[in-house]
Structure formats: C-alpha cells, structure tokens
Image (cartoon, rainbow, N blue to C red):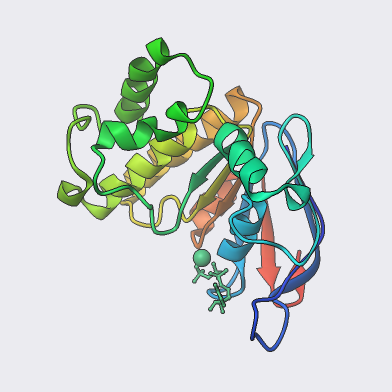
C-alpha cells in the first residue's frame, strides 16, 4: 500500500537535509509505528507521503495501483489523496465552520461513495469513536480529545488504502486511546489498507505490527 524509495528532503535555508536516501514499505493490512525524537522529521515524512510537502528526490508509491505521488502535479496529488489517503493531522485541522457531521463528511464529498451511504457511515464511525450524538455540534464546543476523534472518524470514513496518522492518540486518556487504536487496527486489517502511525507512546508502538525509528541518520 506504500513504498518509499530513496527519499530526500531538505527545507530551504536549513543547514542539512532532514532525511536522505530514506526507504520504507507498508504492506496491505499492516500497521507500522513511526517513532523518533521531536523535530527529527516524522510529520514532514508523513506530509511528503501525502503529497502535502514536496520531496527533493525519490519515489513514493501509494495505493492499489502503486501511483508515484512525486511525479504527479498538484491536482492529481489532491485527487489521489482524496481517494486513497486518510490523514489524521497532528493539529487535527477540524474545520471550525462545519459541524462535526459535516467535517466527517468531507472525504465522502470528494469520493465516489454514493450519497445514500453517507449518513450511515458517518453515524457508525462517530459511534465507534465515542461521539454518538455529536453530529450537530460545532468544533469550538469540543474538547481536544473529542476534536482528535472527529479527525480520526474523518480519516477513515472513505475507507482509504493508506492511513497516515500523526500522534492520533496524543490527547486521549489511556482507555479512549486504546479504543481508538483498536479501531485503527481493525479498519486497517479489515480493509487491507496500510497504516503508518507516528507516536511517542511505547504502548501504541507495541500494539502495531512493527516499529520504525527515525533518527538524524535515517530510518531503522
Ligand atoms: N515548513 C518548514 N520550513 C522549515 N523548516 C521546517 C518546516 N516544517 C518543519 N520544519 C523543521 O523540520 C524539522 C522537522 O519537523 P517535523 O515537524 O517533521 O518534526 P517531528 O519529528 O514531527 O517532531 P514532533 O515529534 O515534535 O512533532 C524541525 O526542525 C522543524 O522545525
Ligand atoms: Mg510532528
């Protein structure tokens, strides 16, 4: 579901490359933890994979047809993202002017999922993340952990081939974090998707199929 080969990234003005010659792969049904010190480049790597940040070199092949995002133009990258990627951002990015239900619906509006299925899918997922009955609530009235769970429901609703999650349980108590992780594991395996999950939690990493450590020298 994901194959990264020889990836390099250096921010303009930075004294050294954040990473270079990086390679990794995530198979269908596999959930991989990505750990590493703050500032080492985990979010940047996720953003490059999602095509939100451009890499300087390398290839990033995604989804059932192994489409190389690096070679796509902006519009094609956006289309690929809409169809095949579910992204949980470190800062949630829940849209403040949309209700909870409308936020979760965004990927569906960009997908080919029939309109008649939207409400059921949204309802099921909100129930699973413990936000049943929150459909009409506004993001401003939600706690940090609730916003995080809206972001998780939104990342899964269109059943993406690749799930990228940046600290998806960082704001949750241990029990809720465990339930969210159960959901991510279940969806990844049932849908034969691949998942790459950035975490600072040893417990989360242990429940994944394997762990990659990103350091200044590369991945191991
Ligand atoms: N747009 C940018 N321009 C320049 N430098 C950036 C940019 N975005 C991130 N950086 C720098 O790149 C480095 C890696 O940032 P990144 O957000 O990928 O780290 P991270 O591993 O996700 O850290 P954390 O665990 O704290 O979330 C940091 O030193 C950061 O300051
Ligand atoms: Mg980060």
> Taking 143 as reference, is 42 left or right?
right
Position in image of residue 2 (x %, y %): 73, 43
> Taking 124 as reference, is 203 left or right?
right
Position in image of residue 10 (x %, y %): 70, 75
User: Which residue, as the protein is rendered here, is positioned at the far top?
Assistant: 116
Nearer to me, 110 or 58: 110
Q: Residue at x 74, y 29 (%)?
A: 64
Which picture quadrant has residue 6? bottom right
Relative height, residue 121 to residue 81 (above, below): above
Position in image of residue 89 (x %, y %): 46, 53
Relative height, residue 71 to residue 106 (above, below): below
Q: Residue at x 41, y 15 (%)?
A: 115
Image quarter hosting the N terminus: top right
> Taking 83 as reference, is 20 left or right?
right
Position in image of residue 181 (x %, y %): 46, 41
Image quarter hosting the C terminus: bottom right
Q: Would residue 82 be seen by someone viewing this image from the given angle?
A: yes
């Amino acid at each position: 579901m994901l194959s990264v080969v020889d990836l390099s990234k250096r921010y303009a003005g930075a004294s050294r490359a954040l990473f270079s010659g990086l390679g990794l792969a995530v198979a269908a049904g596999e959930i991989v933890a990505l750990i590493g010190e703050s500032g080492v480049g985990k979010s940047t790597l996720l953003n490059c994979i999602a095509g939100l940040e451009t890499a300087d070199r390398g290839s990033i092949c995604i989804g059932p047809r192994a489409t190389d995002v690096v070679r796509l133009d902006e519009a094609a990258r956006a289309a690929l993202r809409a169809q095949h990627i579910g992204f949980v951002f470190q800062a949630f990015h829940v849209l403040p002017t949309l209700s909870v239900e409308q936020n979760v619906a965004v990927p569906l509006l960009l997908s080919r999922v029939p309109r008649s299925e939207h409400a059921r899918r949204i309802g099921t997922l909100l129930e699973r993340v413990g936000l049943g009955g929150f459909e009409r609530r506004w993001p401003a009235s939600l706690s940090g952990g609730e916003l995080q769970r809206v972001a998780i429901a939104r990342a899964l609703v269109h059943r993406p081939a690749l799930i990228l999650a940046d600290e998806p349980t960082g704001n949750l108590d241990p029990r809720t974090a465990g339930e969210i992780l159960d959901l991510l594991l279940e969806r990844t395996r049932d849908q034969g998707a691949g998942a790459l999950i950035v975490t600072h939690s040893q417990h989360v990493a242990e429940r994944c199929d394997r762990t990659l450590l990103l350091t200044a020298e590369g991945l191991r």
